[in-house]
Image (cartoon, rainbow, N blue to C red):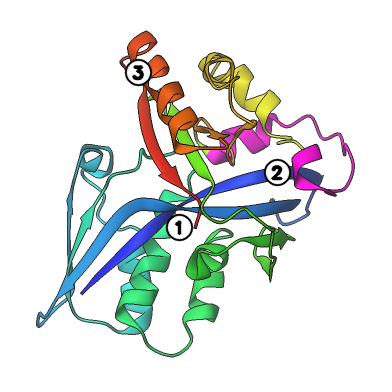
């Protein structure tokens, strides 16, 4: 049994207000890449989780995480292995996507309700299809954007982790208006994220050849949308040569 935890990007993200419960009211368009972490499950008498892959060390020492919480909520018993291919604290919904993959892989009733209880991004990651998110981002409405599926994407991260809570705390509280057309929109979290991790500016400059270049979520990963695989791959080659320490992923939108 195998399931991909598809990388999430926010095509645009507008922060409208701080809520009394500590969360923020946002308006966003979620989209998902073809690639991500990979979760596998085998039969077992109990529940266990092994983390492997290039970013496994970032989760070392965690006694609990969203994958285990999702599995426990389903009452599942399985030997789980998470191949951690996406950077952690990177704005790609990694932990939420992993939890959603566990819910899809292990099945059971009430997955949608469990997803809402696990985190704001988990409901969108459960379907891993293009959708608008309102409220905390957990009020999901599927949307169809003509020509979006299959779009070549380049994900770039400067290998600097960035905590979501820190970025939202640094938001200036100014409502810059509702989300309309996503291509004319922006990511309101980019400015506070760049103050915390200035390398984000360099990443966006490196993606200047893209049709759309924007930070995803709370950062620090940025994405570029390209008109062809050839243009995407050429940009990836240039960036890899100039900044060999950065993490890159050449993929497409689902």
Label of residue 96 in the image:
1
Residue under label 3: 240
Q: Position of residue 240 (x, y in %)?
A: 35, 18
Q: Position of residue 127 (x, y in %)?
A: 51, 70
Distance from disc 3 to disc 2, alpha carbons, whole Å, reads: 26 Å
At x 75%, y 51%, the residue is 26
Residue 167 drawn in magenta: yes
Q: Earlier in the sequence, mark 3 or mark 2?
A: 2
Callout 3: helix, strand or loop?
Answer: helix
Q: Earlier in the sequence, mark 3 or mark 1?
A: 1
Q: Position of residue 191 (x, y in %)?
A: 70, 24
| Residue 126 shows up from this direction | yes
Of residue 139 and residue 114, the one placed in the foreground of this image is 139
Residue under label 2: 12
Callout 2: helix, strand or loop?
Answer: strand
Q: Is residue 35 above or below residue 56?
A: below
Q: Are marks 3 and 1 in contact (CB under 8 Å)?
A: no
Distance from disc 1 to disc 2, alpha carbons, whole Å, reads: 19 Å
Q: Earlier in the sequence, mark 1 or mark 2?
A: 2
- Please rate how many residues cluster around mark 3, counting C-alpha atoms within 10 Å: few if below 14, some from 14 to 19, many from 20: some
At x 31%, y 75%, the residue is 105
| Residue 25 shows up from this direction | no
Q: Is residue 16 above or below residue 98?
A: above
At x 20%, y 75%, the residue is 1
Residue 57 drawn in magenta: no
Range drawn in magenta? 164-184
Q: Where, by quadrant of the figure, is residue 133 drawn?
A: bottom right
């Amino acid at each position: 049994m195998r399931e991909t935890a598809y990388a999430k990007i926010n095509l645009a993200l507008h922060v409208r207000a701080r809520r009394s419960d500590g969360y923020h009211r946002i308006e966003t368009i979620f989209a998902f890449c073809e690639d991500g972490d990979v979760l596998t499950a085998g039969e077992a008498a109990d529940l266990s989780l092994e983390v492997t892959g290039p970013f496994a060390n970032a989760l070392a020492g965690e006694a609990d995480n969203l994958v285990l919480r999702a599995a426990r909520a389903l009452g599942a018993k399985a030997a789980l292995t998470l191949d951690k291919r996406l950077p952690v604290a990177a704005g790609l919904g990694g932990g939420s996507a992993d939890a959603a993959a566990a819910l899809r892989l292990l099945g059971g009733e009430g997955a949608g309700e469990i997803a809402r209880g696990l985190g704001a991004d988990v409901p969108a990651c459960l379907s891993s299809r293009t959708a608008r998110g309102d409220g905390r981002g957990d009020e999901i409405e599927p949307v169809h954007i003509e020509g979006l599926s299959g779009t070549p994407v380049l994900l770039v991260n400067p290998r600097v982790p960035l905590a979501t809570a820190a970025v939202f705390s640094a938001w200036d509280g100014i409502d810059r208006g509702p989300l309309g057309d996503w291509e004319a929109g922006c990511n309101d979290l980019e400015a506070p994220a760049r103050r915390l991790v200035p390398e984000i500016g360099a990443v966006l400059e490196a993606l200047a050849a893209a049709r759309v270049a924007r930070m995803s979520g709370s950062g620090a990963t940025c994405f570029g949308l390209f008109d062809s695989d050839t243009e995407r791959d050429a940009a990836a080659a240039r960036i890899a040569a100039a900044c060999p320490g950065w993490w890159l992923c050449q993929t497409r939108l689902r």
